[in-house]
Structure formats: C-alpha cells, structure tokens
Amino acid sequence: MRHEQRVERAWAAPWLRTVVRREAMAIGRTRRRQVPVEEEVLDRIDPAHGTNVEDLCERIDERRRAARDLPRLKPQERRALGLLAAGHSYKEICAITGWTYTKVNRCVTEGRRRLRELEAEHATNQVAALQV
C-alpha cells in the first residue's frame, strides 16, 4: 500500500486487485511453510475445500458431464436449469425471465429428462466400447 498516492483513479481497482492477490499468495506461501503436512490427512481431505477427495472427484465428474451435455439442451432449458442451480425458486425464475410458472416447470422438467437421456446414452456407448 506504499504506492497508493501514485495510483490514478482509473487504475485503482485493477491495482488493488493485484495487491490483494499478491498478498494472498504470500500468506499462502507462508502458511505452507509453517503448517506440517500429514500424508494420512491429505489422503482423506482436500485442504482447499475441506471435503473428502471422493466427493471432490464426483463434483469434477459432474461438471465434466454438464459441460458435455448442457450444450445439447435447448437454450430455455439451459437457462431455467442454470437459474435453479443458482438457488432461485420457480417464482424467482418467473420474475427473472418473464415466463409463466408452467413454462418454467416445463423447461426444468424437459431439461432434466434430456440430461438423463444423454447420460444413459453415454453410459450405453461406454459399455459398447468396452465390449469391442
């Protein structure tokens, strides 16, 4: 923060972001040097997320499947499912999109159905590939 007087107003936000990022990285380096690491704990826990490694792998797998399958949904289905995943209720989605409750319900239902069909299709393709 010793250079804050020299920072122009237009560059204040990017400058501050850089300073905060560098400080956070320095704190992380210091912590890694000071905190003892036990292999047993690392096998069970992911320190960045405080969760089981198996759960983390499952979430990564879900994201990969979503990245693969979401583009194959209709745009309205993607939008409805995305808003629902972000924690919005059906009524909130209606207000955000201007759709009726029935349309929101239909988009969510059809989007979920399509995702299940695509997942089943990929599972069938994987079994077929293993049999060859």
Image (spheres, helix red, strand yellow):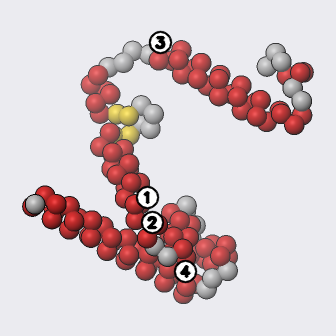
For mark 3, give the secondary structure.
helix
Q: CA distance from mark 3 to mark 2?
A: 43 Å
* Amino acid at circle 3: Gln
Residue drawn 46% across the image and 66% down it: 71
Quarter where residue 125 is shown: bottom left
Q: Residues within 10 Å of mark 4 (few under 14, many from 20)?
A: many
Residue 84 position within the rendered picture, expressed as x and y whole percent measured from the top left: 53, 67
Looking at numbered disc 2 in the image, what kind of residue is underneath it? Leu
Is there a contact, CB below 8 Å, between mark 4 and mark 1? no
Do the CB atoms of the residues marked 1 and 3 lie less than 8 Å apart? no
What's the distance in space between the residues labelled 4 and 2, CA to CA?
17 Å
First in sequence, mark 3 or 2: give its number: 3
User: Which residue in the protein does label 3 denote?
Assistant: 34
**Closest to the observer, 131 or 52:** 131
Question: How far apart, in angstroms, are the residues tagged by discs 4 and 3?
Answer: 52 Å
Amino acid type for the residue under numbered disc 4: Val
Can you give x and y, in whole percent of width and height, for residue 4 in the image? 85, 22
Badge 3 crowding class, 10 Å Cα cut-off, few under 14, some 14 to 19, many 20 or more, is: few
Q: Name the residue rendered at 58%, 20% in the picture.
A: 27
Note whether 95 is above or below 85 in the view shown. below
Q: Neighbour class for label 1 at 10 Å: few (<14), some, many (≥20)?
A: few
Q: Secondary structure at mark 4?
A: helix
Distance (Cα) linking label 4 and label 1: 22 Å
Q: Circle 1 sits on which residue?
A: 67
Q: Nearer the viewer, mark 3 or mark 2?
A: 2
First in sequence, mark 1 or 3: give its number.
Answer: 3
- Closest to the camera, between mark 4 and mark 3, is 4
